[in-house]
Amino acid sequence: MKTYSFLKASAAPAVLGLALLAAPAYAQDQVADESRAVIDQSGFIVVTGSRIARRNLESAAPIAVVSDEEFKLSGTVNVENVINTLPQVVPGTTSFSNNPGGGVATLNLRGLGSARSLVLVNGRRQMFFDTSQVVDLNTIPSFLIDSVDVVTGGASAVYGSDAVAGVVNFRLKQDLEGVIAGGQYGLTEEGDGSRYNAYVAIGGGFDDDRGHATVYAEYYNRSEIYQGARSYTNSVLGDDGSGGFVPGGSSTLPSGVIRYFGDGDTTGTDFDENGAVVFDEPGNFRARNGDLYNYGPANYLQVPQERYLMGGFADYEFSEGHTVYAEVSFVNNRVPNELAATPVTGSFAVNLPSIQSFLTPADYAQLVQLEATETTDAGDDNIELFLQRRVVETGGRNTLDERSAFRTLLGFRGDITDNLSYDAYYSYARTRNGNIQSGNVSRSAFSAGLDGTGTAINVFGPGTLTATAVDQISILAQNTDISVLQVVSGAINGTLGNFGMGADDIGFAVGVEYRKMASEFIPDTALSSGDVIGFNGGLPTSGSYDVKEVFAELRVPLLGPDSGIHRLEANGAARYSDYSLAAVGGVWTYAGGVEFAPIPDITFRGQYQSAVRAPNVGELFGGQSQGFPGATDPCAVPANATDATIRALCVATGVPSGSSALFTTGLQLNTQIQGLFGGNADLQEEKSTSYTFGAILQPSFVPGLSLTVDYFNIEVTGAISVLGGGLANSLNLCYNVIQDINSPYCQVFANARNAAGILDDTNPAQILAANTAKLAVEGIDLEVNYSTPIGLSLTGAGESRLNFNFLGTYTKTNAFTPVEDLPNEVNECAGKFGQLACGNPTPKYKWTSRVSFIDGPLTTSLRWRHMSSVTDDDADVDYSTERLPAYNLFDLSFALDVNDNLTLSMGANNLLNKKPFTIGDNQEQANTYPSTYDVLGRDYFVSAAIKF
């Protein structure tokens, strides 16, 4: 069976139409079972990407379609696992996202960001999960999916804000008659990471089939895998500076580290060697010699998950030609993230007499010598020390996200005349997330245990914290997220006659829509005060806004078969949106396209679209929160030592001019640098333009063959991003590009260093949201489908078919310009990966292909997933891993229809047990990019589905 295809459809999913009566519909010149659409009782089709009902599936923009068969053959329960294999998609947050995590699964079309990918279910907006207004794919029941439509390019003229990179519409089965039930179990070859689910759905008609209703429920459970369970993730790796790897990790040790940056006399002390000491046993320190803590084994590799999902939908024809319909769904999703024990770092005032009993007499005497010889406040028994202590006595850091999402919808649809119909609905969706954090440490309590104002705590050696001390410094913290989406939408759809010559009728749709988005983040007192060490703190965020819209769409068939050509058609759409946000106000979006088919075998098509994305609640009203992105401090790069300009900037931004650590790795202790990130109420909308053009080939002389090729080009201006494109890129802009202390990109670092010149948590750089960036993607999509009967039958069924599908993307450009005013400073991410700007690998060539042999009741299917090689995105840093070779995965699956009521499936993903690539300092997490490269190894699944 076909698993993917490009529909001849327009550029965004449909909201209007009888979505509750979804059924396959095929154009006359379409290869059988290639595509899906919504069809009403009069035979008109509502194609994904348009509100206009029509009689065929032709359209000016391409749509890739994933059928329900792909979910069965891939052994997938969670939607993300199939969607992320598509070449149009760069993985977002997945089941392998532990740090950062969040307990969600998101979708990122074309690598333009999850916030720029509009997700719909049955053509309507799905609930979002937090202030970023991004949809969690965990809220979508995969066992009810009929097909998934993936649209390329902006679609705001049809669906409003957020449809910048494209639209993904999940069509659920609406015509269920009887009962379907089933389950699946998966396990890795290592015997861990089990996953299982069970589901049931019941549907049928009532009142002489004037109405139809479906109810459903599902339970899903996924077990954790720790990084310590795999040899390639067990030990944190770092670069050795010579193209190899060394055991890496954190400089914050469970036994403790003391660094001294004062001006006291270090002669004769263990601090004299490099200013830092560590403990091998309680109370007895020595000079630090590159000691690191391997935090990897304590981190999740696969995060566990438990999900309960239930819901229903129904429609009823209360009067001839008029139907009321309703939908309701509820999802409870629990996902924890687990990190190594809390690393406490920072400058602390230490009262020497209060800690004297915790140190050997010789070591205590060294601290007394340092304090007594300082130029200020000498002899007061207090000393400023930079302490690093991994508080393993509290256990690991665990954060549990329990997210409950509720959505309900009520609508009416029907006929006004023979040529006019209406559809209007109201939907309400609310998501609440309770986030509970354990393993945190109170900075104030930790400080009080050192400065003499509280009961003294012993952090000077391994295992020195008593249970009483742990209780004294530990703090339980929690956050709450509440998000609400309300939509009121109404549209009229109809036809206006035709121009003759065999052309179809002119179609149109007009309507209005109102949306209100509200979201808030509620941290507890400790989190909002910044007193928590362990997980990122933050300030409360709360806000809402609404938008009132009017829209229109027109489809004009100009010529038909009687004119001597097969078909010529034009389309257009426009939308006016009035936002309650003063900085956005009223905005127009529009689209236009054309299709030309000289003969039935070939169609040429093109589409142009103007789209917008309004800022979300988090970007607008977000309080400042702490983050620890991977970044390189140019003042800690040895190669910069001879650059006088960079040296002057380092001094101007707070590095002591005589510091021996300047231009050494000792200036920046960790590969992650802390920053403060937050919202900006003056943000404006993002604007985008996109155009696609291509061709569809369905040669009549090769039955069963279809080929589509489409060029795409999307550009986003005024893109909302953290200042400069992030902390890492802002460092690069300040020190390597702009090199002006008065630049805003340098001013954010002017007061961000401590007295030793280190970028730490003393006064983190404020990298706030701004309309400063530009995004651009360009490439070509190619799909080939071929299906043919063959004369070979191994089961004795008498007939068999061979199906082949290839869906691939060539990405020519994936460019990120952090500052539009510096157009020459572009981060090109096509064929790149890395910490500077690109993040997850974006291969230039990515494809998924499947060949299936369907022999009566037995389907045997082999899938090939390919990603071309990628190189690191930072030309100024020479990492040990500068290039990741091409990556190929093969999956084998079987499906057997035992009878009309029972289907069994089984298979193995990553059949050849391909390992992920090993990466050092430029990794994301777990020594690789775990959402891109398979970290589980060979993985098996079995499933059963019953219907009656």
Image (cartoon, rainbow, N blue to C red):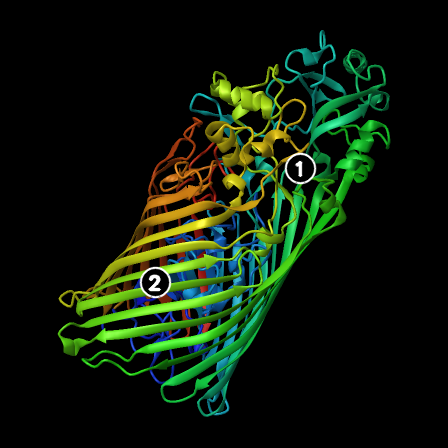
* Dot in front, 1 or 2: 2
Q: Is residue 46 left or right of residue 819?
A: left
Asked if one can make out residue 716 in the rendered structure from this viewpoint, the answer is: yes
Taking the view exactly as shown, the residue that stands out farthest to the top is 268
Q: Is residue 245 left or right of residue 899?
A: right
- Amino acid found under the numbered disc labelled 1: Ala
The x and y percentages for residue 513 are 51, 72
Asked if one can make out residue 282 in the rendered structure from this viewpoint, the answer is: no
The x and y percentages for residue 214 are 51, 78
Name the residue beneath numbered marker 2: 63
* Residue at 52%, 79% in the rendered image: 411
For the N terminus, give its image quadrant: bottom left
Name the residue beneath numbered marker 1: 341
Q: CA distance from mark 1 to mark 2?
A: 47 Å
10 Å neighbourhood of mark 1: few (<14), some, or many (≥20)? Answer: many
Q: Is residue 269 left or right of residue 562?
A: right
10 Å neighbourhood of mark 2: few (<14), some, or many (≥20)? Answer: many
Depicted 542 relative to depicted 946: above or below? above
The x and y percentages for residue 232 are 48, 35
Query: Where is residue 408, by image quadrant?
Result: bottom right
Badge number at residue 8: none
Query: Where is residue 369, by image quadrant?
Result: top right
667 or 657: nearer the viewer: 657
